Amino acid sequence: MEEKKIDVQSIIGFLLIGAILLWMLYNNSTEETALEENQETEQVEITPDQQPNNIASTEDNLGTDQDSTALAEARQRLGAFGYSATLESASENSTTISNDVLELTIDNKGGYISEARLKNYKTFDSIPVYLIKDDNATFNINFSTTDGRTLETQNLFFEPEVSQNGDNQVLSMKLKVSEDEFLEYRYVLKPGEYMLDFSIRSQGLDDVFNGSQDINLDWKLKGYRHAKSISYESRYTDLMYEYEGDKDDYLGAGDVETGEDEDISYVAFKQHFFTSILLTDNPFERGTFRTENLVEDEEVDTLYTRDFAASFPLELQGGELNYNMNWYYGPTDYKILNDYDRNLDEIVPLGWGIFGWINKYIFIPFFAFLSSFLPSYGIAIIVMTIVVRIVLSPVTYKSYLSQAKMKVLRPEINEINEKYKDNAMKKQQETMKLYSKAGASPMSGCLPALMQIPVFYALFQFFPSAFQLRQKGFLWADDLSSYDVIAELPFNIPFYGDHVSLFPILASIAIFIYMTMTTGQTMQANQQPGMPNMKFIMYLSPLLMLFFFNNYASGLSLYYFTSNLITIGIMLVIKHVIIDDEKIHAKIEANKKKPKKQNKFTRKMQEMMEQAEEQQKKGKR
């Protein structure tokens, strides 16, 4: 076998081919790398990741220009407060804060409450009770700036910020000039409270406010109708305020009422059973008030009762505003208002003087005690009525005893009237002598009746103001704070209404029977010439009550019906069991035989009548 030899040329050729291949591979790799680098460079210039940055940068520049333009335009309109118009809060948004009894919605525009809802109450037609809703209220500060502008906060946008301070919700509404300069409304709502803290303060606005011009706070509200009887609700709807420390006043229920006073510490827009109140720790220097009746026709379904308005000047302190105040949106409940110890109980119309004293210290605590354990408020009224009549029964006894004495003396009085019918002076003189000897007097029957008037009037004020009776039913009455209905009429009777209430009918019948028992037997016998016909008045009084109470609180009619029914029973017991006419007659005859010592007043009257008689005789001569 032939041995192979190494071919040098072949080796050289392979080496050259290998070198060429290596060079080509290297050259291709370098070109691909360069190409990839070139491609990557081109992709960086058009990459989507980088494109938004470039666009955003452009938009930022454009937005800055637009913001600057918007700010310039806003400041041209609003001066320093133009800043607030360029913020994100410059919108029709609102913020809601609430607790378990009250829900408030505060708008960015104006920084004031746009809705105030009482969670636990409904209107007569089962709609939630709103004190503020659908632009029925405004709260505005009118001020001038150092650059000559006049602005109103109700047209400017506040920036809201909600925070928590313990269990309290805090809402800060800031009308900004810059981030550190602003006018702030601060609301603090506590758990379970109808009263919230409220403050107005400014920071850094001493060179913005024009201190030489008045800064005025205006608060307005149109009161919504909440009750079945619009006339009844309007009767107890009024504007009240406190001034000069502890004095209080109200405007009245006329078509248009105005008032003005100094040192105002609170103002209340009272809508019978619900009230909106603004209170201030530092009294306003003065306040002007106005109300207008909005009920044009009581037969028409009315939305509003009255239009309220109050205006106060605000004072700068060191060029800034700083007022600590409170808002109250809640029921006109004596206990709730009285517990605040801010003299707010005066908002509840309990009567003046002794009448209010009787309600505050006797009837309100006593009724609260009874209603705390009795099954219904109607029964509580009946029980309280029974107790009142029992307490007053000695006065009733004195009154009836006097009438019984007058009844026994009636034959002798008739004899005197007949004997001296032509001599009025002598007739009066002899009548007084008879009264003096018998120990009787017509006044002794009137005085006990007069003593009961404070009690009756206090209760007349108590029942329409008793918030506890609102929407509480009894028997056929579904609301003791409003009228009861047993029949609807197809027409309206002036001063009576379009319905028939049963409790006033029962009360009128009971009053007629009572008046017949107490005065009907003697009034004609004692009728004096020239005096009005008392018998006619006896019939007229129950009729007037029937008309007047048809639209009144059924709780009050229930009281009068029960009271007169009990009084009739007491009178029957006194007449048939306690008082004996024969014994009274015997006692009167015994008194006649005794020497009667006249008091100074009786003796003086006797002397005056004798002198007048002597002068009359001399004149005839």
Image: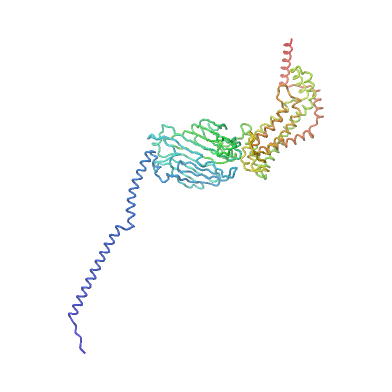
Residue 289: image location, x then y, percent = 52, 32
- Residue 306 image offset from top left, x and y in percent: 55, 36
The quadrant in which residue 457 appears is: top right
Tell me how many marks there are: 0
Q: Quadrant of the C terminus?
A: top right
Left or right of 177 on screen, residue 496: right
Q: In this figure, which colouring scheme has been used for the structure?
A: rainbow
Residue lying furthest bottom in this view?
1
75 lies left or right of 388: left
Q: Residue furthest top?
A: 621
Q: Is residue 620 above or below residue 493?
A: above
Q: Residue furthest left?
A: 9
Q: Is residue 437 left or right of residue 1?
A: right
Residue 120 visible somewhere in the drawing: yes
Q: Nearer the viewer, residue 117 or 293?
A: 293
- Name the image quarter holding residue 102: top right
Residue 341 % position (x, y): 56, 38
Q: Quadrant of the N terminus?
A: bottom left
Closer to the camera, 22 or 235? 235
Residue situated furthest front in the rendering = 490
Does the rendering let one see residue 358?
no
Residue 122 is situated, as x and y percent measured from the top left of the image, at: 58, 44
For residue 307, side relative to residue 182 (left or right): right
Look at the picture and state if 338 lies above or below 519. below
